[in-house]
Image (cartoon, rainbow, N blue to C red):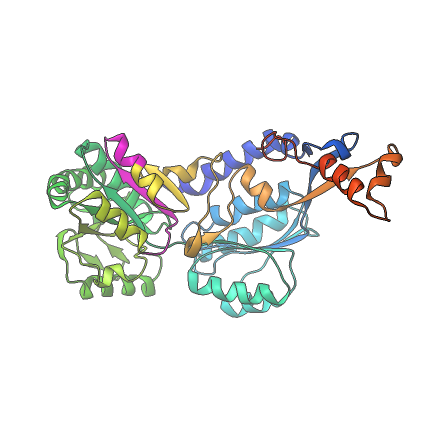
Amino acid sequence: EAVLSEIEIVVNDLCLTISNLQTWMQPTYVGTNLATKLDDCFVRREPLGVVLIIGAWNYPLQLIMLPLIGAIAAGNCAILKPSEISRATEKLLAELIPKYLSQECYAVICGGAEETKTLLENRFDHIFYTGSQSVARCILQAAAVHLTPVTLELGGKCPCLIYGRLDMKAAAKRLVWAKFFNAGQSCVAPDYVLCTAETRDALLPFMKEALESFYGSEPQQSQDMGRIVTDRHWDRLVELLKKSEGKIVIGGESDKKTKYIAPTVVVDVKESDALMQEEIFGPILPFLTIKSLDEGINFTNEREKPLALYAFSDESQVVTTVLERTSSGGFCSNDGIVHMSLSGLPFGGVGASGMGNYHGRWGFETFSHKRGCMMRSWLLERVNVLRYPPYNESNLSWLRWATTAKKKGWAGCSVM
């Protein structure tokens, strides 16, 4: 899991960027009107300047390196603030970044909340933050002082809506893998499941089978089952389970000494349950029952827009309906979390789950200023007489005709 989510995803994004950067950097020419027919009109990508990248602890390498790739590709200098919770990776980045990258352009700042607060007092040309919504509000307040633009990669409760005909065995495997990857400590992990009681009862035996296939009869002894990052996070998750009024049908065991929590499934969970009041961010999966697809969609839409939304169904109409009637940062049908591994797709939230996006070219664009440029000559000065005072209705009519946008798509430009 570490190789896939921390190393390979970074290497793949890096190779994609190196292979395509020359193309991405080229000006994008836009369509012109009659008044600008002889002009060169284009969008030029330029560096923003010095950017601040604040990473998170759950994927401490990926969540620093992927935005850094975009920042470097766009020509920026960068200050990196890794999470202090993932101490080993923080230490490693502090050692390797100065060794391989110019210390005049890139620096790593270690420390906790106080160091971050002090860092935010400085003026940056862009701030890129991955983490919680509560800290994001502090980031926005600090950025507002200097009118600094921000990218916020947050989280939220990502629903998995299961409805209609289904390959139960395959669905169980994919759901179990997506949820319990990194012990559920993924911002795009399915946070809860919405399905009918019949679907739930049919799916649960296959989920038990998948869990035993993945982690054995004793997941605590499995080398493939992760652990909770700190005692504080372990305490929070165990407390959520204690407060829940749902019924534990799979797992539920825990061990504070090793920060272990078993892959856990809870059914008969109500909307008011403790497990539904915050992002779980751990190996606990609640099931809520619905009677219809409309009920599931309405339940989703009544809440903050999630970072990811999943729809499981063999019926294409069900998947299309969920896609068209909901909003989320990302969407994936019949699987979980894999959409974020494709560099060609933008990764980011919407509403409370974040603003802005990155990965591949999207990261390059995030850290680039799109400068609109018009290169004019001194030709056709006689035509320009139409725009100079003294004004009259005849000249205005000619100007309106000459500056009318041509019907050629979005400003007639070639888009990404």
Q: Is residue 349 above or below residue 124?
A: above
Q: Position of residue 149 (x, y in %)?
A: 59, 56
Q: Which quarter of the figure has residue 294?
A: top left
Q: Which quarter of the figure has residue 74?
A: top right
Instruction: Give me the residue at 63% from left, 33% from top.
Output: 24
Compared across the picture, whether 93 is left or right of 329 comes to: right
Residue situated furthest front in the rendering: 393
For the question of whether residue 334 can be seen, the reply is no
Residue 304 on the magenta span = yes
Residue 179 on the magenta span = no
Residue nearest the viewer, comparing 298 with 56? 298
Residue nearest the viewer, comparing 30 with 404? 404
Q: Position of residue 259 (x, y in %)?
A: 28, 58
Q: Quadrant of the C terminus?
A: top right
Q: Position of residue 327 (x, y in %)?
A: 38, 46
Compared across the picture, whether 239 is left or right of 118 comes to: left
Compared across the picture, whether 216 is left or right of 184 comes to: left
Q: How many marks?
A: 0
For the question of whether residue 365 can be seen, the reply is yes
Residue nearest the viewer, comparing 237 with 243? 243
Compared across the picture, whether 274 is left or right of 148 comes to: left
Q: Is residue 273 above or below residue 390?
A: below
Q: Quadrant of the N terminus?
A: top left
Q: Position of residue 248 (x, y in %)?
A: 14, 55
Residue nearest the viewer, comparing 82 with 309? 309
Q: Which span is picked out in magenta? A: 303-320
